[in-house]
């Protein structure tokens, strides 16, 4: 069973509602959100959960690799343009 903090000793959930205002429900004990906004018992991944790892597209290594490839493509395009101009 989910136990809520008493309203006089806790803050509010604070998650944004559909109307855009903050949620005014007290958070679940030991959590920062109410039961409707992610504070339910057993919600979230367990510590060390690798199932939440999706792809790594935004990792620093992936960003650096994409930047390196983009720089190389730009360099190749410049070289090809210079070669075409020399042939004229």
Image: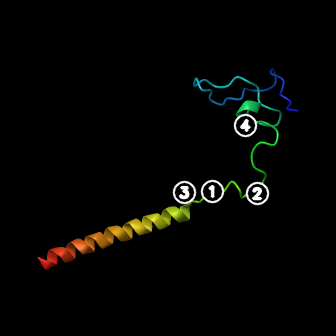
Q: Residue at x 75, y 56 (%)?
A: 49
Q: Position of residue 39 (x, y in %)?
A: 76, 36
Sequence-first disc among 2 and 4: 4
Residue 47 in view in this figure: yes
Sequence-first disc among 3 and 2: 2
Q: Residue at x 55, y 61 (%)?
A: 60
Q: Residue at x 83, y 33 (%)?
A: 29
Q: Position of residue 33 (x, y in %)?
A: 73, 33
Is label 2 in contact with label 4 (beta carbons under 8 Å)?
no
Q: Residues within 10 Å of mark 3 (few under 14, many from 20)?
A: few
Residue at numbered disc 3: 58
Residue at numbered disc 2: 48
Residue 34 in view in this figure: no
Distance between the alpha carbons at the discs numbered 2 and 1: 14 Å
Sequence-first disc among 1 and 4: 4
Report the coloring of the rendering. Answer: rainbow
Query: Within the image, what quadrant is residue 42 found in?
Result: top right
Q: Position of residue 83 (x, y in %)?
A: 20, 77
Q: Position of residue 52 (x, y in %)?
A: 69, 54
């Amino acid at each position: 069973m989910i136990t809520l903090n008493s309203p006089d000793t806790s803050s509010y959930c604070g998650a944004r509602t559909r109307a855009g205002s903050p949620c005014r429900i007290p958070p679940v004990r030991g959590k920062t959100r109410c039961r409707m906004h992610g504070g339910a018992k057993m919600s979230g991944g367990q510590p060390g959960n690798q199932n939440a790892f999706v792809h790594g597209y935004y990792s620093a290594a992936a960003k650096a690799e994409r930047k390196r490839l983009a720089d190389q493509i730009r360099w190749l395009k410049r070289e090809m343009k210079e070669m075409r101009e020399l042939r004229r």
